[in-house]
Image: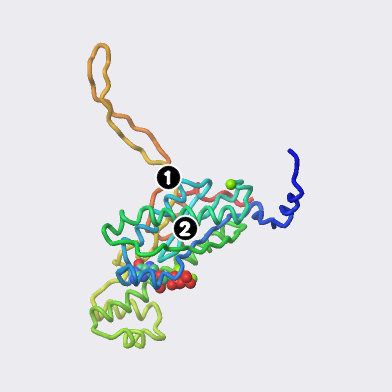
Amino acid sequence: MAKSKFEYVRCFETDDTCLRNCYIVVRLDGRNFHKFAEQHNFMKPNDDRALGLMARSARSVMEDLEDIAIAYGQSDEFSFVFKRSTNWFKRRGSKLMTHVASQFSSSYVFYWKEYFGEQPLIYPPGFDGRVVLYPTNRNLKDYLSWRQADCHINNLYNTAFWTLVHKGGLSTTQAEERLNGTLSADKNEMLFSEFNMNYNNESPLHRKGTTLIWEKVDETSTKRITLPKEGEKEVTFTRSRRKVTAHNCDIIGDLFWEEHPDILEEDS
Ligand code: DGT
Ligand code: MG
Ligand code: MG
Ligand code: MG
Ligand code: MG
């Protein structure tokens, strides 16, 4: 193919190939969701419609893009972990990140109505993205633990804060002052002794966030078939399919990783 004299401009493109043998993590975060949540009347501190829509959009990313082994989300963010051996888009960081961000954003708008019903989406939401590489399983687990610990810290604070406001009759300023300098144990104790709430019984979706993984799931379906001798007959099929499943569980401890040993590839 003949090259035009303009071809040289390609040389200005920079190489952003992600280092081999590393997990590639793409983390998205909602742009100015403080305002987006207010304008769309999100429930405080947690809106299950909004969290459901985030997880639905993340599932669309996992199903429609290649090689994502696990995703974890909370609040207005979601992290997607590409297999460390992926060669999708020759591991080009910008390609991976922009595909994740655009698939997620369009899904968020596409599925809005399924979660918010007649409440309209009043302006287009946006998400920023970043790429981070993790060379070892320990580093990757610590990354995910960091995000889940963040979920826990924020949710405990927000639960205590809004309980003081909604049930304790404090103003938001008073609630903030009351929580200033308190430790996790203090907040747990306050919820328990003053409001008869055991934080551990609060919704796992809110306390743990959402983890999406691929799992083999047995699906049964029935079909009517016509056999030459027996005539019409109902038969049941069972087949095993790979599906994205959602979990609101602890991923900091070892149990989750022991129960799902195929998510991570061995360190070599
Ligand atoms: P950014 O990310 O720098 O563009 O700015 P924001 O405002 O998105 O800040 P960020 O990402 O640190 O914090 C997430 C915001 O989203 C935070 O203000 C609370 C809001 N948000 C997320 N999920 C919920 C929810 O379920 N209910 C309510 N009321 N707000 C939520
Ligand atoms: Mg931010
Ligand atoms: Mg944000
Ligand atoms: Mg955020
Ligand atoms: Mg093209």
**Left or right for 228, reference 209:** left
| Quarter of the figure with the N terminus | top right
For the residue marked with disc 1, what is the amino acid? Glu
Residues 135 and 8: in front is 8
Q: Mark 2 Cα within 10 Å, few/some/many (few <14, many 20+)?
A: few
Residues 261 and 105: in front is 105
| Disc 1 element | strand
- Indicate the quadrant of ligand 1 in the picture: bottom left
Q: Is residue 75 above or below residue 255?
A: below
Q: Which residue is outermost to the front?
A: 5
The residue shown at (55%, 56%) is 97
Residues 51 and 94: in front is 94
Q: Disc 1 vs disc 2: which is toward the camera?
A: 1
- State the image quarter where residue 118 is shown: bottom left
Q: Position of residue 227 (x, y in %)?
A: 27, 15
**Left or right for 263, reference 134:** left
Q: Mark 1 Cα within 10 Å, few/some/many (few <14, many 20+)?
A: some
Alpha carbon of mark 1 to alpha carbon of mark 2: how far? Answer: 18 Å
| Disc 2 element | loop
Q: Which mark is residue 254?
A: 2
Look at mark 1 in the image and give the residue it sits on.
215
Q: Are marks 1 and 2 in contact (CB under 8 Å)?
A: no
Q: Position of residue 16 (x, y in %)?
A: 66, 56
For the residue marked with disc 2, what is the amino acid? Asp
How many numbered circles does the render carry?
2
